[in-house]
Image (cartoon, helix red, strand yellow):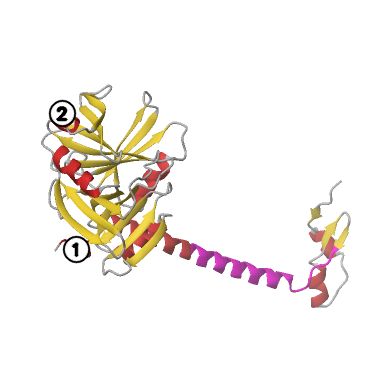
Amino acid sequence: MASSTIRPSLSSFNKLPSFSSRNLSQRLSLFHLRSGVRLLPHNFGLKASRFLRNDSRCMRVMASRNMSQSATQENALDWVKQDKRRMLHVVYRVGDLDKSIKFYTEGLGMKVLRKRDRPEERYMNAFLGYGPEDAHFSVELTYNYGIETYDIGTGFGHFGIAMDDISRVVDIVRAKGGTITREPGPVNGGNSNIAVIEDPDGYKFELLERSPCPEPLCKVMLRVGDLDRSIKFYEKAVGLELLRKQDNPESKCTVAIMGYGPEEKSTVLELTSDYGVTTYDKGDAYAQITIGTDDVYKTAEAIKLAGGKITHAGPVPGYKTKITSCVDPDGWKTVFVDNHDFRKDLE
């Protein structure tokens, strides 16, 4: 039978002969065991008391530290909600900049907002959209010298453009030799009309019949492996609001629409998770979404507290523009640019 600890009775103490106070203390610390007797030091109670006090103090310090960290996280997340954020542009690579500009302006009705050439770094940019960059979302096309083709991968989905007559735009794109992957028609189970086309590099554009629309370039769709994980990241780290979540059994996917404002009035991020798919090939064509912020350093701290990975925080090497760049749990990149520096860049 396993040994057990038995507390000595008072009667057993009464039978003890007289001892010095030290011996009495030791005798009172006897533990009677079936297998024998263990003698504890006379100062055992004092040491235990000190240990308990130290342990209690340590627990209070740890609790205080945890409360401080929790408060820091709450403050950072509260700041994210109050930060003046707006989606500025989406960046992706093209193989022929002039050809792409021609398609976007003549086929989709965009305007060239600005261009820049960096021969020392061997690339060119063109910003296109439907309104001034200080108030509207735009696309940033990047051409790297000598590279004509890119792999779009399976993770990137499409861009969305809202317009009042999608059939007219589809006819224009068709006349110019563009690719139509979905003819204009109603969405399954809904009343909205959409069409899908491809640009010269194979990027898909979903045309949504919607009027009037203050933000025509209205959506970026990316695929993710764990939708709930991604929603949590974009809420806490990026500050986006979950506008709606929809399960589509017919398409075997679940969709989350996230943004800084109402879906019908601002650009949104559409996260799509296909049933049973946890990883996607991101390719090397799509680059990132760029978002404005009042403080790139506070943004970086909030991203860290939300479990995000920071790839850069501070001025862009060789430039004065301050940014924070990070990647989400699936590896999709987001860049935050200082609002003041962005406005200066537009001058």
User: For this rendering, which residue is in front, 347 or 25?
Assistant: 347
Earlier along the polypeptide chain: callout 2 or callout 1? 2
Mark 2 vs mark 1: in front: 2
Task: Report the residue at 40% width, 54% height from top.
Answer: 306
Where residue 145 sits, quadrant-wise, is bottom left
Give the amino acid type for the residue marked by disc 1 in the picture.
Asp
**Residue holding disc 2:** 171
Rendered location of residue 124, percent (x, y): 25, 56
Seen in the picture, residue 79 relative to 264 is either above or below; the reply is: below
Disc 2 to disc 1, how far (Cα)?
A: 37 Å
User: For this rendering, which residue is in front, 158 or 30?
Assistant: 158
Which region of the structure is painted magenta?
Answer: 38-64
Task: Examine the residues drawn in magenta and state their main secondary structure.
Answer: helix
Task: Decide: few, some or many residues near mark 2? Use Cα within 10 Å; few <14, some 14-19, many ≥20.
Answer: some
Task: Decide: few, some or many residues near mark 1? Use Cα within 10 Å; few <14, some 14-19, many ≥20.
Answer: few
**Residue holding disc 1:** 345
In the figure, is residue 333 to the left or right of 343?
right
